[in-house]
């Protein structure tokens, strides 16, 4: 903790925050400034010419003065009357020593000694002062003045034990506890503490405990609020996810219906196209009737799903029927199946012919050949 405290003091942050606070405080209302300024109030106790003098830090006028010859009760009463109106938890008392009783030396120490200045100063006591470390009480503070590269400037303040211990013993006999031993500086104090750690006043700080409890409560409530907010967000997200899942199911059903509709429409279109492209049975019969000679007739006619046409009949000259069917726009590849046989009863030739329905040429796309824009020829395929 001491190393952290020294590192904090040596950093530029305290100066920055002091400047920043000094700029912000004038912008606040007076009541807020008074509330923020409340806290530990230091009172300075000095002895001069056999009298004790008490004043507030930063003020030159004393609050009270009493003789050291009074009994303990009278001196405690004078002290209590001086800081009447001050919260007991905020009362801090510093004993100020005469400047000529304290030896002050400026030392140049390595930067590595920053975290343990008090210990290093104890090792240097015999060399830097005419006293042994057991003969004195001392304090060390780091100075802001420039130092040699790789070193820091510190000030060593030393007071003899036979000077300070009697004063502390006298105040202890009077029932007056001090919180620090310091030196005067202008209307305040220098800011050091020569008080031995074993004689430091032990204070109860109920306000600190209350503040810590309130801070803990604030942290707990903040965590609860954040947990509640997170829980609410998770619930809202779960509800939205359920809605999205339901909508996804509906969307999938709609997509399935749309696909089914497209498939049905495609099938219907395909059938309509096939029907439009394929000649009807009556059309084929009409074409055959128009092309066959009047002396020929059919006995049987068939048309299968593959577009194959078969018809059987009789004609005086069956071989000439091929020439009659060559110009048909509906039939291709007309041919005899089997042999032509004479019929004794009618005196004509019996035949059986097969042909294939004409298939229109498929429409070409724009990415195909250059004649894609030309409509398909209604004639027979090449």
Image (tube, rainbow, N blue to C red):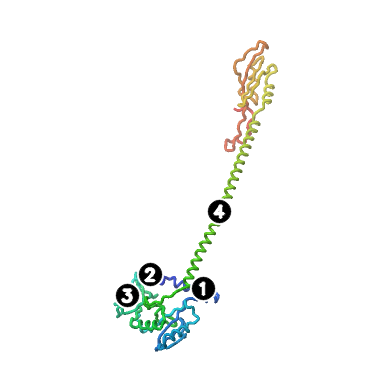
Q: Earlier in the sequence, mark 2 or mark 4?
A: 2
Q: Nearer the viewer, mark 1 or mark 3?
A: 3
Describe the element under mark 2 as helix, strand or loop. Answer: helix
Mark earlier in primary sequence (2, 1): 2
Q: Which residue is mark 2?
A: 3
State which quadrant residue 372 falls in.
top right
Numbered circle sitting on residue 237: 4
Quadrant holding the N terminus: bottom left
Dot placed on the residue nearer the N-terminal end, 4 or 1? 1
Q: Is residue 154 above or below residue 307?
A: below
Say which residue label 1 marks: 24
- Element under disc 4: helix
Mark 4: few/some/many CA within 10 Å (<14, 14-19, 20+): few
Q: Evaluate if marks 3 and 4 touch, with contact meaning CB atoms under 8 Å apart.
A: no
Against 288, residue 255 (above or below) is: below
Q: Earlier in the sequence, mark 2 or mark 3?
A: 2
């Amino acid at each position: 903790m001491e190393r952290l405290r020294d590192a904090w003091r040596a950093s530029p942050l305290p100066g920055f925050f002091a400047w920043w606070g000094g700029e912000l405080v004038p912008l606040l209302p007076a009541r807020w400034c008074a509330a923020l300024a409340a806290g530990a109030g230091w009172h300075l106790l000095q002895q001069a010419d056999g009298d004790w003098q008490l004043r507030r830090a930063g003020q030159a006028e004393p609050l009270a003065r009493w003789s050291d010859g009074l009994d303990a009760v009278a001196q405690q009463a004078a002290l209590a009357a001086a800081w009447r109106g001050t919260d007991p938890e905020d009362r801090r008392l510093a004993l100020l020593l005469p400047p000529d009783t304290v030896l002050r030396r400026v030392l140049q120490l390595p930067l590595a000694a920053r975290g343990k200045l008090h210990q290093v100063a104890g090792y240097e006591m015999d060399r830097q002062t005419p006293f042994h470390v057991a003969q004195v009480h001392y304090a060390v503070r780091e100075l802001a003045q420039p130092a040699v590269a790789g070193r820091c400037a510190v000030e060593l303040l030393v007071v003899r034990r036979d000077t300070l211990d009697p004063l502390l013993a006298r105040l202890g006999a009077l029932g007056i506890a001090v919180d620090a031993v310091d030196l005067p500086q202008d209307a305040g104090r220098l800011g050091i503490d020569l008080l031995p750690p074993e004689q430091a006043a032990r204070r109860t700080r109920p306000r600190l405990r209350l503040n810590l409890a309130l801070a803990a409560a604030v942290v707990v409530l903040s965590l609860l609020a954040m947990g509640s907010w997170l829980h609410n967000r998770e619930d809202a997200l779960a509800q939205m996810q359920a809605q999205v899942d339901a909508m996804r199911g509906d969307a999938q059903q709609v997509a399935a219906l749309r696909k089914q509709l497209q498939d049905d429409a495609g099938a219907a279109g395909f059938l309509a196209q096939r029907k439009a492209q394929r000649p009807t049975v009556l059309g084929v019969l009409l074409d055959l009737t128009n092309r066959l000679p009047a002396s020929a007739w059919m006995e049987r006619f068939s048309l299968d799903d593959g577009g194959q046409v078969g018809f059987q009949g009789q004609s005086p000259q069956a071989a000439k029927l091929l020439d009659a069917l060559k110009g048909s726009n509906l039939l291709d590849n007309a041919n005899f199946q089997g042999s032509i046989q004479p019929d004794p009863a009618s005196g004509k030739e019996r035949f059986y012919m097969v042909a294939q329905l004409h298939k229109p040429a498929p429409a070409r796309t724009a990415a195909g050949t250059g004649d894609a824009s030309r409509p398909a020829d209604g004639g027979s395929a090449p």
